[in-house]
């Protein structure tokens, strides 16, 4: 009958436009047979609103695809400016946009940056290379290292640090003199160094270190002046402690003595 002829199955893998045109032609064919909107919607499975729009149209209603203008579109230039100024994370860019009235979500900014990151990177200038941020421990290591073993960039960092703080420069000189005095065993510089290191103008950390050494001044002076060393004794004590820890709770003193003598 006419209803079956009007309900022709759409072709496989057809484009959205051709499928929509086919539905329009089906609706118009049923309309010409005197079917109501309710009956057509039930027969074709199309919503009543869509059937009504097809009924009221004089011809096939074409769809004109216009570019979408989302919430982020008015802020594209702002994002480009933030990127050129060094704001390179989606979180920071989103916070700046919210302050300017942006109502979109954080993930909207993330998706936009994923699409436009190559273009933004090509427009922004190459950032200047910055010196890495160092921890206090690495700065202390850098300041006390011999100058002849520093690279050019490390030399520049040391100059900037000492230029910015005179106390650091004074402490660096004292620590460097100490590191040269001990390996060279220069006993004549000990008294002068101790006086400089305990002065009130020296930073507290260096002053505390020197005060601790001052308590054992006689032993330190003897270590600098005399040719003997207690390194062998300390090594044997360390070896005995290591064997004791290995056997802790497992054997008695007899086995400890046997192991120590065998090693010796």
Image (cartoon, rainbow, N blue to C red):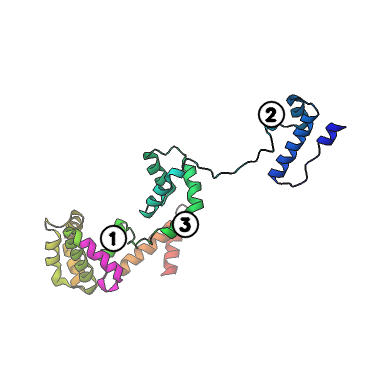
Q: Does 150 appear in magenta?
A: yes
Residue under the image location 16 percent in, 64 percent down: 218
| C-alpha gap between disc 3 and disc 2 | 46 Å
Which structural element holds mark 3?
helix
Of the 4 image quadrants, the one containing the C terminus is bottom left
Give residue 34's position: percent from left, percent from top. 79, 26
Camera-side residue: 176 or 217?
176
Per the rendering, the mark at residue 119 is 3
**In front of the other: 180 or 163:** 163
Q: Residues within 10 Å of mark 1 (few under 14, many from 20)?
A: some
Vertical arrangement, residue 224 with respect to residue 61, above or below: below
**Dot 2: within a 10 Å radius of its alpha carbon, few (fewer than 14), some, or many (20 or more) residues?**
some
Q: In the figure, residue 197 lies in which quadrant?
A: bottom left
> Which residue does the image show at 69% across and 38% down from the upper left?
60
Q: Earlier in the sequence, mark 3 or mark 2?
A: 2
On screen, 184 above or below 130?
below
Element assignment for label 2: helix
**Of tags 2 and 1, which is closer to the observer?**
2
Identify the secondary structure beneath mark 1: helix
Label whose residue precedes the other's in the sequence (2 or 1): 2
For disc 2, the marked residue is 52
Q: If you read the primary sequence from the N terminus, does the residue marked by circle 1 or circle 3 appear first?
A: 3
Q: Mark 1 highlights which residue?
A: 139
- The residue segment tinted magenta is 146-162
Can residue 87 be seen at all in this image of the molecule?
no
């Amino acid at each position: 009958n006419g209803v079956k002829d009007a309900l022709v199955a759409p072709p496989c893998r057809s484009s959205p436009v051709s499928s929509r045109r086919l539905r329009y032609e089906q609706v118009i064919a049923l309309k010409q047979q005197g079917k109501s909107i309710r009956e057509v919607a039930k027969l074709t499975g199309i919503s009543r609103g869509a059937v009504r729009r097809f009924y009221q149209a004089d011809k096939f209603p074409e769809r004109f695809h216009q570019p979408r203008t989302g919430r982020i579109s008015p802020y594209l230039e702002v994002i480009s400016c933030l990127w050129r100024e060094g704001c390179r994370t989606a979180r920071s860019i989103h916070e700046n946009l919210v302050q300017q009235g942006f109502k979109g979500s954080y993930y909207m900014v993330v998706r936009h940056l994923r699409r436009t990151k190559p273009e933004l990177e090509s427009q922004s200038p190459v950032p200047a290379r910055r010196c890495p941020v160092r921890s206090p421990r690495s700065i202390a290591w850098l300041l006390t290292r011999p100058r002849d073993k520093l690279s050019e960039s490390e030399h520049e960092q040391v100059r900037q640090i000492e230029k910015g703080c005179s106390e650091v420069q004074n402490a660096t000189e004292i620590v460097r003199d100490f590191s040269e005095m001990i390996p060279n065993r220069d006993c004549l510089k000990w008294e002068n160094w101790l006086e400089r290191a305990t002065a009130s103008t020296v930073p507290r950390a260096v002053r505390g270190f020197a005060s601790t050494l001052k308590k054992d001044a006689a032993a330190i002076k003897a270590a600098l002046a005399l040719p003997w060393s207690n390194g062998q004794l300390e090594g044997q004590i360390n070896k005995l402690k290591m064997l004791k820890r290995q056997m802790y709770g497992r054997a008695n003193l007899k086995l400890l003595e046997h192991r120590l003598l065998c090693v010796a």
